[in-house]
Image: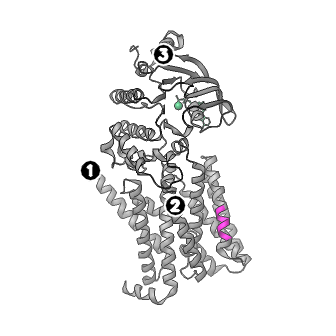
Amino acid sequence: MPLITCRNVSLQYESTVVVEDVSFAVEEGDYLCIVGENGTGKSTLLKGLLGLLPLRGGEISFSGMERREIGYLPQQTPVQRDFPASVFEVVLSGTLGRMGRSPFYSREAKCAARENMARLGVDKLAKRSYRDLSGGQQQRVLLARALCATKKLLILDEPVAGLDPLVTSELYALIRKLNREGLTVLMVTHDLSGVLKDANKLLHLDKTVRFFGTPAAYLDTRAGQRMAGGGSNAGVS
Amino acid sequence: MLAFLNALTSYTFLSRALIVGVLVALCAALLGVSLVLKRYSMIGDGLSHVGFGALAVALALGVTLMAFAIPVVVLAAFLLLRISENNKIKGDAAIALIASSALAIGVIVTSLSGGMNADINSYLFGSILAMSEGDVYLSVGLSVVVLVLYLLFYHRLFAVTFDETFARATGTRAGLYNMLLAILTAVTVVVGMRMMGALLISSLVIFPALTSMRVCRSYRGVMVCSAVLSVVCFVVGLAASYLVGTPTGATVVVVNLVSFLLFAAVGRLRKLVN
Ligand SMILES: Nc1ncnc2c1ncn2[C@@H]1O[C@H](COP(=O)(O)OP(=O)(O)OP(=O)(O)O)[C@@H](O)[C@H]1O
Ligand SMILES: [Mg+2]
């Protein structure tokens, strides 16, 4: 039984259909990469998976986990630049989905938050203000927050956008490590060459599914060659 | 200061104002942090104008003020929230329209019912003499309810304020908490309005949060700092207004302004030093 199954999923904003008839399955332990040009519905598909947008048609089913147990890293979080919050407060808020009816965080929640900060190497920043961090540090903090929300599935929407090459490859290494530790990873990215070695599945989205299969098979298609060649790190393939 | 303490024990209107004022200042400060960070400051302002309209109508009809004003303002809170969520672009314009319309209706109703001059002044700018004993009990009760609810949902409100998308993705019902915020604000505005004045109450919501954001770096720091600051500013303002003979609401606002400028200067200095 796959972890996530999407059958003929369609999504819309107001009355424009943005994603149409998308079907795919994600197995436990997969590293699925979603690629596609700007505005082709990648983020929208993730919103459908997360239940942030009602389905227009089709169905999405989860097995062995609940939808709210997804660890989500949004694309360019719309957090304001002057928001006062310490790193610990931000990471801790990832455990919210697990606290049930209790109004306060449990001791386990706090432990989990500390553990995940250590896992991502941001434990030294715990007391710092989130707004004072660099872009790469902020992404790590948000990734730690996502880890607090899940034990199984990470959904990442362009996690490396705007990061320099060094920080980017560090973040990829972290994600690879998490995947090896057993987490299923579902990631939207424009940087195909950076993840081709890590991913075991690839979905090319252009409103509907253009390609779904292994990265190696994708590179043999015309679309695949164009995406890989058109990327900023051309030639790495 | 001693004169103020003496007066406090001998005049019940002063001690009533102090009790209710401190509680309202506390509620307003806490809610204000969320409102400012969520960019909902306009809602607080809009609600106070609606509150004025409701107050005027209640007086004209001869019904109990709070019993009438609170449901009306809570209803307005629902409406304003919807407006500001649905069409982000014209939301603030719509709120301004509703606010000024409510104000206009309030003014007309007051003048038609005969009590134009003295009364209207006290509604718009507040009056320390406005509290009856019943008002005090009701205000204390409501403020305590607001405080308890806010503290119970503190972490969820933080999550929804910091990143609504993520909060919703992990199963937090963001709409519910936005509504809670609007309703608590509505109640606080109505409770504080008689004393602070319809035109000045929203500053009690906004000032402490903005002031503490100048220097504090964590969310909890901002909350604690706002709460303390708000209460201190209120007490200082009340004392000053009694001693100098200025209107209470306006004096409290000016004290808040001074503390804002102080904190802003400290924040700047700290940035320069680092
Ligand atoms: N909230 C919204 N309301 C209406 N239309 C939207 C909304 N969000 C996105 N769209 C539209 O839906 C389409 C798909 O958007 P989406 O954000 O899913 O693209 P994307 O593949 O993630 O693009 P990018 O690579 O730029 O992030 C776009 O045409 C966009 O204009
Ligand atoms: Mg996107």
| Relative depth, front residue between B194 and B158 | B158
**What subunit carries mark 2?**
B
Q: Give x and y (percent) for residue B184.
A: 57, 62
Q: Is mark 2 within 8 Å of ligand 1?
A: no
Q: Looking at the picture, how far across and down is residue B21, in whole percent?
A: 50, 74
* Relative side of B113 to B271, left or right: right
Q: Which mark is residue B274?
A: 1
Range shown magenta: B68-74
Question: How many C-alpha atoms fall within 10 Å of the one at disc 1: few (<14), some, or many (≥20)?
Answer: few
Is the same chain shared between marks 1 and 2? yes
Q: Are marks 3 and 1 in contact (CB under 8 Å)?
A: no
- Label 3, on which residue? A215
Q: Residue at x 52, y 64 (%)?
A: B148
Q: Disc 1 sits on a residue from what chain?
A: B
Quadrant housing the N terminus of chain B = bottom left
Q: Residue furthest bottom?
A: B10
Does the beta carbon of the residue at mark 1 sit less than 8 Å from ligand 1? no
What kind of residue is marked 2?
A: Tyr
B106 in relation to B34, above or below: below
| Sequence-first tag of 1 and 2 | 2
Q: Nearer the viewer, mark 3 or mark 1?
A: 3
Q: Which mark is residue B150?
A: 2
